[in-house]
């Protein structure tokens, strides 16, 4: 099983792609799907959809929850039905919470067999027995600057998914009538949806419900990942505390507050304070990476549901002192012109689902 997804040369578009492929992204607060189809050589958007998971667990919309298998099945069937999905082939993006991804540098000659060395290294860095995970790895390119500093060493990307999680989601996909969907970790789906060969080095900040992630990719392969507890649900909780309102009202205010309203400054201050530490640490990781390599990041792509809060891109721009662009993965597919504004608006939150579906068209 390829967890990494062979981002540059993975699955050929032959089998199944012409009949439609569904990308599935199950987060901690919502579930999203994107269906794509090859129509005369053009990858085309068929449908998309999202359901909030809080209500399935008796919680509020926007809250982070852990669903039991029956609740998860109900949510998936609902989003498939409400989105009028027709595809029976899918790619599932495994949450990082059930995965492990890291880069390691291994001392090895150019002609050495890395396979055994990787397993030895994996035992050191993966916080679980190798018998409990499905392991994948790939050697990654390093920059000319790194090559000088790390002569005699080879950089390897290691990815692992808990076997229990794979089995759980296998049952979920079978319940939904999906045909043995391939699985990859969500970070690779995100990178695929935003990767552009004209821009070899890419930095993406993904804001989820309870965690925010920084992905640094070179030529479509993950080079660095940094994850910190900071997300949309945490920001909503902070707003509810500052304004002394319940979570549901705070979630509503987070997306509908008007700049002219008296409480807007309080909402923005509470929201931004939830990310100050994360953004500082992301900036440090970016600077350290640039110093170690020959890469420069003038622009940062911002994705995830948390990117939809008005002004979060400006806050990130100020914190990083770099240009920030809201991710729009739908630019990689065809769709009706009248949907342009909608695609741009929802784009950041559908990067994982769309990237997963695109795997079948590579």
Image (cartoon, rainbow, N blue to C red):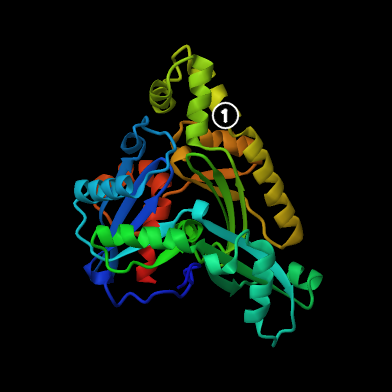
Depth check: give the residue in front, 92 or 341: 92
- Please determine whether, in this image, residue 69 is positioned above or below residue 315: below
- Please determine whether, in this image, residue 265 is positioned above or below residue 41: above
Q: Quadrant of the C terminus?
A: bottom left
Q: Quadrant of the N terminus?
A: bottom left
| Residue 295 visible in rendering | yes
Q: Quadrant of residue 305?
A: top left
In what element is the residue under mark 1? Answer: helix
From the viewer's perspective, is 280 left or right of 215? right
Give the residue at x 35% y 70%.
Answer: 361
- Please determine whether, in this image, residue 257 is positioned above or below residue 196: above
| Residue 331 visible in rendering | no
Depth check: give the residue in front, 25 or 309: 25
Give the residue at x 51% y 57%.
Answer: 187
From the viewer's perspective, is 352 left or right of 112? left
Place of residue 159 in the rendered image (x, y in percent of width and height, measured from the top left): 56, 65
From the viewer's perspective, is 156 left or right of 184? right
Crowd band around label 1 with a 10 angstrom C-alpha radius: few (<14), some (14–19), many (20+): many
Place of residue 287 in the rendered image (x, y in percent of width and height, measured from the top left): 72, 50
User: In the displayed image of the protein, which residue is found farthest to the bottom?
Assistant: 111
Depth check: give the residue in front, 252 or 203: 252
Give the residue at x 71% y 56%.
Answer: 290
- Please determine whether, in this image, residue 146 is positioned above or below residue 307: below
Give the residue at x 40% y 62%.
Answer: 167
Place of residue 41 in the rendered image (x, y in percent of width and height, measured from the top left): 28, 71
From the viewer's perspective, is 223 left or right of 310? right
Residue picked out by circle 1: 272
Place of residue 329 in the rendered image (x, y in percent of width and height, measured from the top left): 40, 53
Q: How many callouts does the rendering have?
A: 1
Q: Quadrant of residue 122?
A: bottom right
């Amino acid at each position: 099983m390829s967890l990494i997804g062979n981002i540059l040369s993975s699955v050929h578009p032959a089998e199944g792609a012409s009949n439609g492929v569904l990308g599935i992204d199950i987060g901690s607060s919502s579930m999203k799907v994107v269906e794509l189809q090859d129509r005369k050589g053009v990858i085309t958007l068929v449908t998309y959809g999202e359901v909030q998971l809080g209500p399935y667990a008796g919680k509020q919309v926007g809250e982070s929850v852990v669903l039991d298998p029956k609740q998860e099945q109900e949510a998936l069937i609902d989003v498939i039905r409400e989105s009028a999905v027709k595809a029976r082939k899918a790619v599932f993006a495994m949450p990082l919470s059930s995965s492990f991804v890291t880069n390691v540098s291994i001392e090895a000659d150019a002609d050495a067999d890395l396979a055994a060395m990787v397993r030895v290294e994996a035992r050191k860095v993966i916080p679980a027995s190798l018998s409990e995970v499905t392991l994948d790895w790939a050697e990654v390119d390093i920059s000319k600057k790194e090559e000088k500093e790390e002569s005699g060493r080879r950089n390897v990307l290691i990815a692992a998914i808990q076997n229990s999680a794979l089995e759980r989601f296998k049952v979920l996909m079978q319940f939904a009538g999906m045909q043995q969907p391939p699985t990859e970790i969500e970070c690779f789906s995100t990178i695929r949806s935003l990767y552009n060969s004209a821009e070899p080095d890419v930095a993406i900040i993904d804001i989820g419900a309870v965690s925010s992630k920084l992905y640094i990719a070179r030529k479509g392969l993950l080079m660095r990942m940094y994850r910190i507890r900071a997300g949309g649900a945490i920001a909503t909780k902070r707003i509810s505390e500052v304004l002394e309102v319940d979570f549901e009202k705070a979630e509503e205010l987070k997306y509908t507050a008007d700049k002219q309203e008296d409480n807007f400054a309080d909402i923005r201050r509470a929201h931004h304070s939830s990310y100050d530490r994360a953004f500082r640490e992301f900036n440090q990781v970016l600077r350290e990476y640039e110093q170690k390599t020959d890469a420069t990041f003038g622009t940062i792509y911002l994705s995830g549901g948390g990117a939809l809060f008005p002004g979060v891109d400006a806050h990130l721009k100020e914190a990083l002192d770099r240009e920030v662009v809201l991710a729009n993965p739908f630019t990689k597919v065809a769709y009706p012109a009248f949907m342009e504004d909608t695609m741009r608006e929802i784009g950041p939150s559908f990067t994982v689902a769309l990237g997963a579906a695109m795997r079948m068209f590579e």
